[in-house]
Amino acid sequence: MNKTAANTHSHVKEPLIRIVKRDGLKLSKLVLVYVGAILLAMIIGCILLASMGVNPFKFYEKMLTIGVVGNAFPYKCFEGYIKLFTPLLIVSVALSLAFRMKFWNVGGEGQFIVGALVAGWISAIIGESAPSFLVLILMSLGGAIAAGFYGSIASVLKVKFGTNETLMTLMLNYIALYLIMFFGETKADWNILLNEDSARPIFKTFFENAWMPVIKIGSFSLNISLIIAFVITALIFVYLKKTKQGYELSVVGDSISTANYAGMKTGRIIIRTVFISAFLIGLAGAFYVSTAHSLSTSVTNDVGWTGVIVAWLSKLNTLAIVVTSALISILRYGCTQAAAEFASVDSHFADLLQGIILFSVLACDFLTRFKVIINLKRRKSHE
C-alpha cells in the first residue's frame, strides 16, 4: 500500500507556472513601481504619437500644462479643467463607497444622467420666479434624491432577490441614456426642456438664477461647486473613519457572514450605502448642468466610467482619489487642448492613453501582490 502511494506521488507533476502570494512591499517601493508603470505608459504614448508624425515632447508639454503655456487667456484653461475635475471627484468618491462594500455599482453614468435631467426639469418648471439660492438648492436636492432612488433599484433587487448588481446597474445606464435622448429629440408642447424658438430639437439654456455661482478672482472665475466637492470628500472621509455606519460598511465589505453574525442588518446597510453613492452622483450631475447652463445628450462626458477607473487606481482610498482625479483630469482635459493644436491627433487619444495607463498599473499591482514562479526543473526533465 505504501509502495503504491509512493509511486502515485512520484507521478504527480508540479505545474510549470505557479502564482504565489508575495509579502507586502514597503510604501516607497510601491510608489516607485506605480510611477514606473505610468512612465512606461507614457513611453508607449510617445511611440504612438511619433508614429502619427507628432512631436511627443511638445504634445506632452501642452497636455501636462492643460494648454496654459502660450495661451492668451490661461484662466479659461483652469476654468475648463475645474469643470471636468469637480464631477469626476464627486463621482469617484461616491463609487468608492459602494465598492468598499463589494457592491459593484457600474451605474454612475445613468445616475449622473438622472440627476442632471431632474435638475434641468426643476430649473425649467421654476423659471425666473424664485431667487437663485432656492432654485439651486431645489435643483441639487431634486437631482440627488432622484438619482439616489434610481440607484437603489439595483440594491433592493440585490437584497430581496439576489440579482447581479453589475448587470442591473449596467442596464439602468441605458435606460437613463435613452431617456435623455428621448427628451432631447422630442419636439412637443409638454417638453419644456427644449428651446421653443429653435426649428430643430435643442435643449434650452437655463435661466441665470439656475447658474452655479462663481467667485471672481481677477479674470478667473472659481466655481463654487469645486469647494462643495472638497467638502463632500472631507465628509465622506470622516464618515468612513469615525462613524458607526462607516464601520458597518467596512464589515459588510470584508465578510457579509461576519456582519450577519454580529447582528448587523446587512440588507439595510447595502441599500443605505448604495442610496448615498447614487445620491452623490446625482448631485454631481445637478452641479454639472448648473455649471454648463444647459442639458445635453452627452452630459456625462463618460464620468461614470472614468470614476470606476479612478476609484480602483486609488485602491478606494478617499485621499488618493483626490490626487488620482486631479491627474486623470489633467490627462483628459490636457489631451483635448493638445489635440486642438495637433490636427493628426484625435481628441479621444486621452481615452487610449488612459487605458494604457490603467493596464500598466493593474499589471504592476498584480506583480506587487503575487510572484510568478516558473518550474525550470520540470521543463528540463521533459527535455
Image: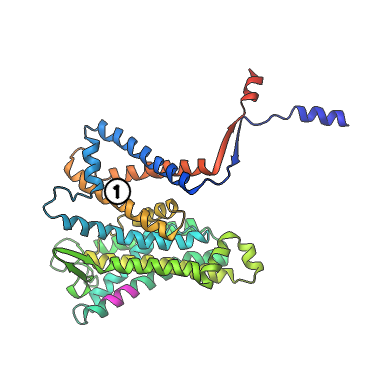
Give x and y (percent) for residue 55.
Answer: 21, 35
- Toward which corner of the image does residue 321 lie, by quadrant? bottom left
Q: Residue furthest left?
A: 72
Is 74 in front, or is 137?
74
The stretch of residues the image draws in magenta is 136-141
Q: Is residue 77 left or right of residue 22?
A: left
- Determine the residue positioned at 17% across, 43% down: 341
How would you classify the magenta stretch by its main secondary structure? helix
Magenta segment includes 133? no
Q: Quadrant of the N terminus?
A: top right
Residue 6's spot in the image, x, y percent?
82, 29
Task: Please give the residue where the numbered disc 1 appears in the rendered image.
Answer: 331
Q: Secondary structure at mark 1?
A: helix
Q: Is residue 260 above or below residue 380?
A: below
Question: Closest to the observer: 38 or 49?
Answer: 38
Disc 1 residue type (three-letter): Leu
**Residue 201: quadrant of the picture:** bottom left
Q: Residue at x 64, y 72 (%)?
A: 263
Query: Quadrant location of residue 92?
Result: bottom left
Residue 145 in sight from this viewpoint? yes
x and y, in percent, of residue 365 in the image: 48, 44
Can you say whether 359 is above or below 164 in the image? above
How many residues crowd around disc 1 within 10 Å: few (fewer than 14), some, or many (20 or more)? many
